[in-house]
Amino acid sequence: MNSRVLLIRIFLITIVLVLIGRLFMIQIVDTKYRAAAQSNILHKIVEYPYRGMIYDRNNRLLTQNEPVYDVMIIPKELTLEDSVEIKELFQITQKEFITKYQKARRYSQILPSLFIDKLSNTEFARIQDRLIKLDGFIVQPRTVRSYDHQSLANVLGYVAQVTPRQLNRDTSNYYRPGDNIGISGIERSYEKDLRGKRGMSYKTVDVRGKITGSFDDGVHDSSSVPGQNLKLTIDLELQQYAEKLMRGKIGSVVALDPKTGEILAFVSSPSYDPNLLSGRKYSENFASIASDSLKPLFARPIQAMYAPGSMFKTVQSLIAMQEKKLRPTEQILCEGNLIGDLASPGIYDVKKAITYSSNNFFYLVFRRVIQQGFESNSYLDSRIGFERWRSYVTDFGLGKRLSVDIPNENRGMIPSLSTYDRIYGQNRWRFSNIYSLSIGQGELLVTPLQMANLGAILANKGFYYTPHLVKSVNNKDLLLEKNTISSIDTSYYQPVIEGMQQVVQMGSGIRGYIPNIAICGKTSTVQNPHGEDHSGFMGFAPKEDPRIAVAAYVENAGWGGRAAASTASLVIEKYVNGEVRRPWLEDYVLKGNFGDARRTKDSD
Amino acid sequence: MRGAQKTQIDWLTVLVYAALVLGGWLSIYAADFDPDANQSIFSFSQSSGRQLIWVISSIVILTVLFLLDFRIFESAAYVIYLALFVLLILVLFFGQEVAGSTSWFQIGSFKLQPSEFAKTGTALALAKFLSDTGRDLSSLRDLILTALVFFIPMGLIVLQGDAGTAMVYSSFVIVLFREGAPSAIIVLGIGAITLFLLTLVLPKTGLIIGIIVLTLVMLGVLARTLRKAATIIFIGLLSIGMVVSVEFVLYDVLKEHQRKRVQLLINPNADPLGVGWNTTQSKIAIGSGGFTGKGFLEGTQTKFDFVPAQTTDFIFCTIGEEQGWLGSSVIIMLFGLLIFRITQLAERQKSSFVRIYGYSVAGIIFFHFAINIAMTIGLFPVIGIPLPFFSYGGSSLWSFTIMLFIFLKLDSHRGELLQRF
């Protein structure tokens, strides 16, 4: 072998040995580095951000952030001789202590893990002095939600600690175990705005576990950024008033401003006290609230679905006129024998038919829409008419989500060709199978919010703003989204609105009459195969320059003219006049005794 | 292809390569691992997930290399060299500045460092140039021309502000040595470096007195002829001149952070929180590993960003901390084995082109490996070059893969490659 090749190889082997030897020195011989590593241990201390505050439209505070304290344990630094005192201090049993301690050890010897979570201010004050004398514990302050008002639980939603499943699904990789996350309602849909940004500080800790200072003069530290404040569209006073009216009843009240789509009141009854699902109380109370047979977690205004009933006659009128199957002033003789009817036989035009809720009138009109004579075969003809009718209906925001800004909205249900093909078979159904739709029964399902929105559409004569609950984020107003029902000519709304005004003046909604506010509305008695009918009302006021659109559903309360019309009328009065001057009607609604089945004229 | 039956791949080298790449991938995951987040090694939010893409694409690249005709590397050597030369010039004008050096092309989110690939191009060109018949490294003319082949790209890389990568080119000295450059040149070169380092350690006046004394002693012992005496005096004066100029270089040529790094090498405790921070933290991390290490993913020092660039230049800290002395030594020996094996393969070549290329590869990998590990354990200033196959990054892994597998490809055809020129 060439001597230079040999030299190169000797050089290579020498360098390899030098490196290995040097490593031997610093890794095994010299203990200086190991000691340095121990004094180099860093504790990451999380600084939880303040969650953004939520205000109502008049800047009344709805939420609070209450300080609580998490006690973290660092197993390596814990002195096990202290265990008796620890158990006594936290009032836990030997078994609980061992479970918690071993869980922490499995996670990490040197990183802090949760030992006791969310001690309240007073609980923490009690143990604070003794706790600081114990090795291996760190206290991490944070906040949980508390609520001054017991209102609006279904809108606000609740906040809880992030679960392992949510962590896995978190593609943005923001969340860490122990973080809070909004689970439902506004807290969930505006989570990104509300949560703020977690801060982190690094403290160097010596072998004894004592914090020796900020690591690297704090250049790696970041302070937490508080979440953004939200201003809701809700009017707290109106909300609380509506909640009071609905107390002890099952149902919904939704009120919105037709000029903006802002939801003024959103009542789901029965509901729950939002404080019950905050902080430590969450785990204690969640199961009992979730399993309550009256479903207080169910946000009825967007999740409950009912047949629209007679309210739907407003939509039917508009479609028939647009399809030129009904002239705005056309008089139709109704003999009252086609379909069950509480309105007496006679001659009706649109306005009168709405006022008295003539079932026979709408039966005739709907037949004209469905069977237009495009085909001689009535089965095929019905299909064409039905398709045309359906496309109008969906324009009114029915059968689809309105995209309100809280989660879990239901879309309701508008039957389609395939719905009936499934039930009856293709070309085996025609008008005579689906005539219930004419009076808002049959396969139709809507949410109370969709009906309140229908009120807004009628008030605006053909457009609506997407209903929403948040007005502004950090004082920046959110953009409104306008939707126009371009398929219906604006002029057709007039007779319908006049009919609706008379509903309250002389028709089924007369209990809702207020002398100085022109309310336009329509009652519904929603057939309920499981028991007493549901009472429904949809409307807006004042007739000129509408300021509020309302839908109310009271379950099992019988005729729409009673519970729902009265409740909606009180809500309108409260909002438009600022106070209610009809104590007798308030008493009637609060007493809630609508169930007497005497058939009087104020029915529908 | 003619003689395909003679194709023999050196599987030992491939195996060592695979072990190093796998070890690197695991180390990157460990270095990036956050026990709170519990991310998968395949997650693209982790460096390890992205490194996997580089690993897989490297396998594709080496497969393609093996499908090419082996003769192309020799015939296209100058073309490749020229192309990379152009890229090195272009990057000066169109490159992205990252941490003080303009050595990256950025195309979308894809970043490419031509200086990484220029090493391979230079090695090919050098091998081609030196293997031409009639080259004689003992002639000064050929020696200077040969040196120019690698001094030109080296200079361009210095202009990019990447002194670390430029220094890698000094590894070609090993090639010159193997190919018969006069010992005197090599000895003078090494002597100059030693003197440079001594200048940093010892006071200037003491050193000059020492040189004068040494020169006088040499004169007395060796100066049999006038010519030898003149040479000794010349070397002595040159040395004094160098000592004087080093101070000038230190304060006027080197950049501030480079000077600090050089000085730190001499006195590591000079500035423990400033520039020494990296080395101190790196040594603490490695030192705390002990004999067997803290275990995979159990490191504490390489987790909280105590150590900077812990997935790239300081990746060895994670191995040192988590695998201890045993694991670190295994890695070092694997590198030693790889380089040793390459020199063995180079020696068995009939073609001088392949032999010279092989030594270039061995030299470059050796330089990277030795300097990178030496800097993490405080034996060398921090010059920011990656640990081959280990450090996170596509350009680095690709360029080392290409460099090594061109050699393996050439070696697998050694039966057909006769001395033809």
Image: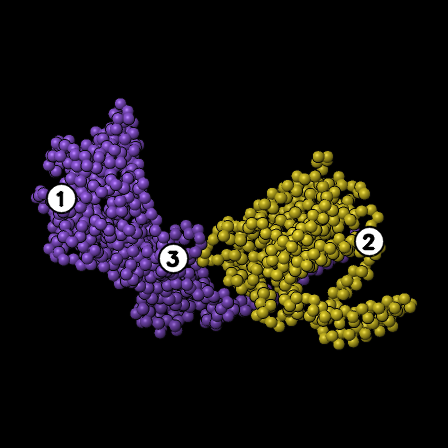
Amino acid type, callout 2? Asp
Q: Residues within 10 Å of mark 3 (few under 14, many from 20)?
A: some
Same-chain status of marks 1 and 3: yes
Q: In the displayed orientation, state which residue is furthest to the top.
A: A376
Amino acid type, callout 3? Asp
Chain A colour as displayed:
purple
Same-chain status of marks 1 and 2: no
Display colour scheme: by chain
Residue A281 appears in view: no
User: Which mark is in front, 1 or 2?
Assistant: 1
- Residue at image position (26%, 23%) is A377
Q: Chain of mark 2?
A: B
Kindly indicate the quadrant of the structure image that contains residue B79: top right
Chain depicted in yellow = B
Q: Chain of mark 3?
A: A
Q: Is residue B289 above or below residue A505?
A: below
Judging by the rendered image, the residue that carries numbered circle 1 is A507
**Quadrant holding the C terminus of chain B:** top right
Q: Nearer the viewer, residue A537 or A45?
A: A537
User: Which mark is in front, 3 or 2?
Assistant: 3
Query: Residue A193, which numbered label?
Result: 3
- Residue at image position (64%, 50%) is B399
Mark 1 secondary-structure assignment: loop
Judging by the rendered image, the residue that carries numbered circle 2 is B142
Q: Where's residue A515, x and y in %?
A: 14, 52
Q: Where's residue A505, x and y in %?
A: 14, 47
Q: Nearer the viewer, residue A268 or A208?
A: A268
- Residue at image position (66%, 66%) is B255
Q: Nearer the viewer, residue B197 or B10?
A: B197
